Image (cartoon, rainbow, N blue to C red):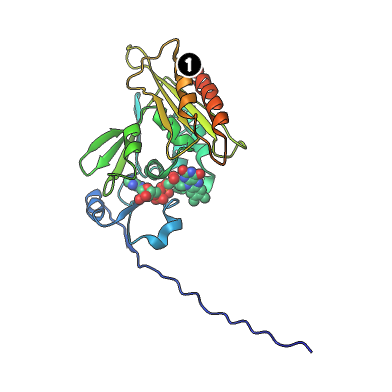
Amino acid sequence: MGGVLWWSVRPVARETMRMEYHRPRSLDEALDLLKRSIPLAGGTSLTPGRRGLSSVVDLQDVGLDSLEVTRTRLTAGACVTIQSLVEHADVIPPALTEVCLLEAGWNLRNAATLGGSLMAADGRSPLLTVLLALGTRVLLQPGNEEVGLNDFLGRRGTDLTGRLITSVSIPRPSWVSYDQVARSPADRPAVCAAAAEMSLGGSPSRLGVALGGFGARPLLLSSADEDPGSEDAPERIGRLASEAYARAGDAWASPEYRSEIAGILVRRVILEAAAP
Ligand SMILES: Cc1cc2nc3c(=O)[nH]c(=O)nc-3n(C[C@H](O)[C@H](O)[C@H](O)COP(=O)(O)OP(=O)(O)OC[C@H]3O[C@@H](n4cnc5c(N)ncnc54)[C@H](O)[C@@H]3O)c2cc1C
């Protein structure tokens, strides 16, 4: 005769912290709350760690979701979603639409915002790589401080506590090119590169080039604010790319592979941007 087995099912004790949730209706109110809370935008990055949060300020009613397009730039509120950029494909460069689609699937794109992505995305982000090449600028409050994306990325995790990205200003290029190598077409890149050619009002065109696919953030190899571009740009900046990834090894690619591919992709996107 078989015996009877009894399982004892006891609730597992779990430490839960009470989280304050604030939903201000004005920017001033949000900034005040940020003295003791962190911003909550789409929540796609924050939600998995929600049990560790003590206070959040939901930004959805603050009015940071406008999108303004002029001849020279696109100014997006920090809460504009990645999907909403896709839906403005008629006014944004094709390569920017392409990287928004690569950044995440439809569900995630509908929630994830531009501001949240600038704060949370890593070096494998196609979107961050293109925004860096374009010479994107970020407006921070309080203080009305405008910073280049390259400097902004250098400050993440250090002195941005209590600061809010309110808008993102993206120059409209004469051409921008993007390419990537990944394990599958929908996967995040092991190496990616973007080049933007900016020609403003008759002055010599400028070249912005960024490299991504590894680490905490993409790298700016040439700044659209400074580099006038030249015939040797593909070779010169391609070499910089190979050197930058000479030790960039992880589970997705060896450093030798990344370094080789980085040089090839960077040369390719520069040639495309210069002669579309
Ligand atoms: C299934 C899944 C897969 C993912 N894969 C990747 C991936 O492969 N690579 C990657 O980089 N990310 C990935 N993410 C992370 C995330 O989707 C993105 O980084 C996203 O764009 C974050 O945007 P959000 O609006 O949801 O930000 P939130 O989650 O709301 O916030 C992210 C961070 O930014 C801060 N923040 C938000 N808005 C502002 C603002 N206006 N000003 C100042 N700070 C702000 C928040 O306080 C928080 O620290 C993934 C997420 C999920 C759920």
x 61%, y 37%: residue: 183
Q: Secondary structure at mark 1?
A: helix
In the rendered image, the vertical position of residue 155 relative to residue 107, given as above or below: above
Q: Residues within 10 Å of mark 1 (few under 14, many from 20)?
A: many
Relative to 272, is 161 on the left or the right? left
Which image quadrant is residue 169 in? top left
Residue 101 in view here: yes
Residue 232: x and y in percent read 45, 11
In the rendered image, the vertical position of residue 99 relative to residue 23, given as above or below: above
Q: Which residue is mark 1?
A: 234
In the rendered image, the vertical position of residue 41 relative to residue 196, given as above or below: below
In the rendered image, the vertical position of residue 252 relative to residue 202, given as above or below: below
Which image quadrant is residue 184 in? top right
x 36%, y 22%: residue: 224
Which image quadrant is residue 69 in? top left
For the residue pair 24 and 236, the one nearer the viewer reads as: 236
Q: Which amino acid type corresponds to the residue marked 1 in the rendered image? A: Pro
Residue 42 in view here: no
Question: Residue farthest to the top?
Answer: 231
For the residue pair 213 and 166, the one nearer the viewer reads as: 213
x 41%, y 43%: residue: 117
For the residue pair 132 and 198, the one nearer the viewer reads as: 132
Residue 221: x and y in percent read 41, 25
Residue 56: x and y in percent read 33, 57
On whether ligand 1 comes within 8 Å of the CB at mark 1, the answer is no
Residue 82: x and y in percent read 45, 41
In the rendered picture of this protein, how many numbered marks are placed on residues? Answer: 1
